[in-house]
Image (spheres, rainbow, N blue to C red):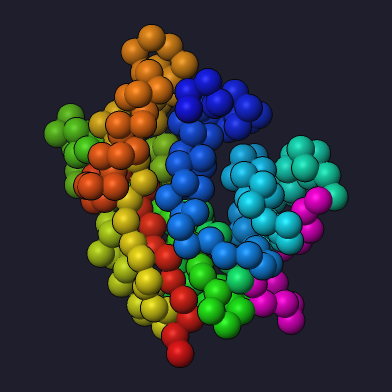
Amino acid sequence: MAAAVASYGEGAAPFDALMRGYMMRAFSPWFTDGACLQVGCAHGDQTSLLLERFDDLTVLEPDPTFVAHTRKRLGDRVVFIEALLEDYETDRRFDTIVFSHVLEHVADPVAALRRLGALLAPGGRLYVVVPNAEAPSRRIAVKMGLFSHLEGLSAADEAAGHRRVYRLDTLQRDVAAAGLNAEQSGGIFYKPLANFQFNALIGGPLISDDFLEACYALGQERPTECASIFVVAKAAG
């Protein structure tokens, strides 16, 4: 995996780019064919991976810089909609909706999830991914005095526009409050180090492919200690 980071990156930090690949692996058992909507594309790393799986891919992204960057990478193989989720009106319904590391940014998470549920086709699935408040790296940061508590926001969180940090139970709570039925939940990649530490070490002698694969495997056993947590949900009824 480490050798593949450069091809994923193109603007994203190494650890963030690496995580996009692990997310795709985690979700692959539940993916089905049909129309896919990605809400929030950032630098396009996950968009590139979704395009390898889905022939019909739409990206909803309000930031024109991210739209331009991802369009430059992928061209006209993706339909881009430059708009906020709350302003997006369409008659289309999607079999797959990927909402990765966006929920922590929105003002009203339950309303956002409810809106996404309304965009699902019958039998469609929504994949919600957020950073995990209970990751070991965050627990270490609390012991170091960098956070007052696990769900505290750092200066870096605030600079990135984060409004909250989720635990698995609080993510499940918001999904249920939006009227969605959780089909599956879990964690992605056991996280013993902070992002900046992984970014400094990935590709070097101290972080091997075997180590990364072991972190992914351990994360499947210990979901509440992962870098990211997720819920796969369907519309109620």
Residue at image x 62%, y 58%? 38
Q: Position of residue 69 (x, y in %)?
A: 74, 39
Pick out the residue farthest to the left: 143
Residue at image x 34%, y 13%? 206
Pick out the residue farthest to the top: 205
**Magenta segment includes 191:** no
Q: Nearer the viewer, residue 201 or 218?
A: 218
| Relative vertical location of residue 16 with respect to residue 66 in this rendering, above or below | above
The answer to whether any part of residue 112 appears in the image is no
| Relative vertical location of residue 102 with respect to residue 184 in this rendering, above or below | above
Image quadrant in which you'd find residue 195:
top left
Residue at image x 73%, y 61%? 56
Q: How many marks can you see?
A: 0
Q: Which residues are magenta?
A: 77-94
Pick out the residue farthest to the bottom: 237
Q: Nearer the viewer, residue 15 or 5?
A: 5
| Relative vertical location of residue 13 with respect to residue 106 in this rendering, above or below | above
**Magenta segment includes 91:** yes
Q: Position of residue 101 (x, y in %)?
A: 48, 52
Q: Position of residue 178 (x, y in %)?
A: 42, 79
The answer to whether any part of residue 2 appears in the image is yes
Task: Judge from the rendering whether residue 43 lies leftward or rightward of residue 143; answer left or right.
Answer: right
* Quarter of the picture holding the C terminus: bottom left
Task: Judge from the rendering whether residue 44 lies leftward or rightward of residue 131; answer left or right.
Answer: right
